[in-house]
């Protein structure tokens, strides 16, 4: 009681609720900031190149290669999924 | 060249529609041919804020589904010469907005020589909100100085940077602007509210303006008149400044230096003022 009275007179200002809000938000804000962040990935071009490369080895369709960029809390996931069509049985 | 501008926020009730109406009207008042589109399918409200609810015949979804031509659905604003409103459908659901359909409508607006196409986003991060930001060249992130709004703005910025056409195609990123609305300089001075500097530091995108909390906004929406038309009100002045800065060439810092923020400082009432009242 007396201590809190003393501290109220002499010192330490109580943190404002706005300061608490800022501190809490500082811990959960995720993004890098509009212009300081890494430039976007050209997903269409990436998809095309993947198709070109894979086509050299396996015949695939354009739709068999999916490229997606997912942003989670503090990381980005580049998801590439390639479906290889079942091999046609060779006709003798 | 048309510019597509999305007004977005993630969180609801922060002032997206108020801002869309005010900014679209402000651009038109400065002589730019502008269209404003309501993307909130199922919960349309822009028509009410713009005061054209009784003139809605066809809507955005009718145009996408080919039941009406775009020219039949566009409503000419009664206050501004260069302004047209495209209302949302009240009866469909958000899936009626297909990406191809939205693109087609925006392309048609470009061909009609609209200089600005303002997209009023629904709240949330679902389909409707994504459609509203997909074709954006610039984005106005509307944020209240309050924890949940700041977090949701952070989230929507992330979505803008991954799902917009510009991001998907690896082009120049969408230009982001931070607009802080419902700001109370008194509460900031008393440590009860995040300051605009705090919000800007947290979100780290350039600030385009601060709109004070004001009773005038309700007065405006009551009458179906965009807040920018309320002569002499702080809100109208603050929105006019935002439009002027938005149109300014060069960097945002220069635009802010040329037209400094107003209505952000709180003058403590003096003793006499406190005794005799008065605002």
Image: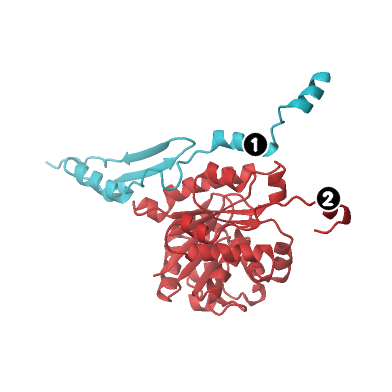
Which quadrant would residue A68 be assigned to in this image? top left
Q: Is there any visible trace of residue B29 in the rendered image?
A: yes
Chain B is which colour?
Answer: red
Residue in front for this viewpoint, B66 or B253: B253
Residue that label 1 marks: A19
Q: Which chain is cyan?
A: A
Image height of B224 relative to A91, above or below: below
Residues packed near mark 2 inside 10 Å, few (<14), some (14 to 19) or many (20 plus) = few
Which quadrant would residue B209 be assigned to in this image? bottom right
- Quick check: marks 2 and 1 in contact, CB under 8 Å? no
Nearer the viewer's eye, disc 2 or disc 1? 2
**Which percent across, then down, holds residue B237?**
63, 65
**Which percent across, then down, holds residue B175?**
44, 55
Q: What's the CA distance linking mark 2 and mark 1?
A: 28 Å
Image height of B156 relative to A9, above or below: below
Element class at badge 2: helix
Q: Mark 2 and mark 1, same subunit?
A: no
For disc 1, the chain is A
Residue A19 lies left or right of residue A5; in this view the side is left
Residue A3 lies left or right of residue B140; in this view the side is right
Residue that label 2 marks: B271
**Which percent across, then down, holds residue B94?**
55, 58
């Amino acid at each position: 009681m007396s201590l809190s009275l003393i501290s109220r007179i002499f010192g330490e200002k109580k943190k404002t609720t706005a300061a608490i809000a800022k501190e809490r938000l500082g811990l959960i804000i995720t993004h890098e900031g509009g212009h300081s962040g890494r430039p976007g990935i050209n997903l269409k071009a990436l998809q095309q190149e993947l198709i070109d490369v894979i086509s050299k080895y396996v015949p695939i369709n354009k739709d068999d290669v999916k490229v997606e960029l997912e942003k989670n809390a503090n990381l980005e996931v580049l998801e590439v999924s390639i479906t290889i069509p079942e091999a046609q049985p060779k006709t003798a | 060249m048309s510019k597509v501008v999305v007004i977005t926020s993630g969180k609801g009730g922060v002032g997206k529609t108020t801002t869309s109406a005010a900014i679209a009207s402000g651009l038109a008042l400065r002589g730019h041919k502008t269209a404003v589109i309501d993307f909130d399918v199922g919960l349309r409200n822009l028509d009410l804020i713009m005061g054209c609810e009784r003139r809605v015949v066809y809507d955005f979804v009718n145009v996408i589904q080919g039941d009406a031509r775009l020219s039949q659905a566009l409503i000419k604003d009664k206050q501004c010469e260069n302004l047209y409103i495209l209302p949302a459908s009240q009866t469909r659901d958000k899936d009626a907005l297909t990406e191809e359909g939205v693109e087609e409508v925006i392309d048609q607006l470009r061909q009609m020589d609209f200089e600005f196409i303002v997209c009023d986003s629904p709240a949330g991060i679902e389909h409707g909100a994504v459609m509203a930001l997909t074709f954006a060249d610039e984005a106005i992130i509307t944020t209240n100085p309050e924890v949940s709004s700041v977090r949701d703005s952070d989230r929507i910025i992330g979505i803008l940077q991954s799902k917009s056409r510009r991001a998907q195609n690896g082009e120049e990123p969408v230009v982001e602007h931070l607009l802080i609305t419902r700001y109370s300089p008194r509460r900031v001075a008393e440590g009860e509210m995040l300051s605009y500097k705090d919000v800007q530091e947290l979100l780290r995108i350039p600030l385009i303006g601060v709109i004070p909390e004001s009773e005038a906004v309700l007065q405006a929406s009551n009458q179906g008149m965009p807040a920018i038309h309320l002569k002499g009100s702080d809100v109208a002045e603050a929105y006019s400044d935002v439009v002027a800065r938005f149109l300014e060439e060069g960097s945002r810092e220069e635009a802010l230096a040329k037209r400094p923020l107003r209505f952000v400082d709180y003058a403590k009432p003096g003793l006499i003022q406190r005794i005799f009242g008065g605002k």
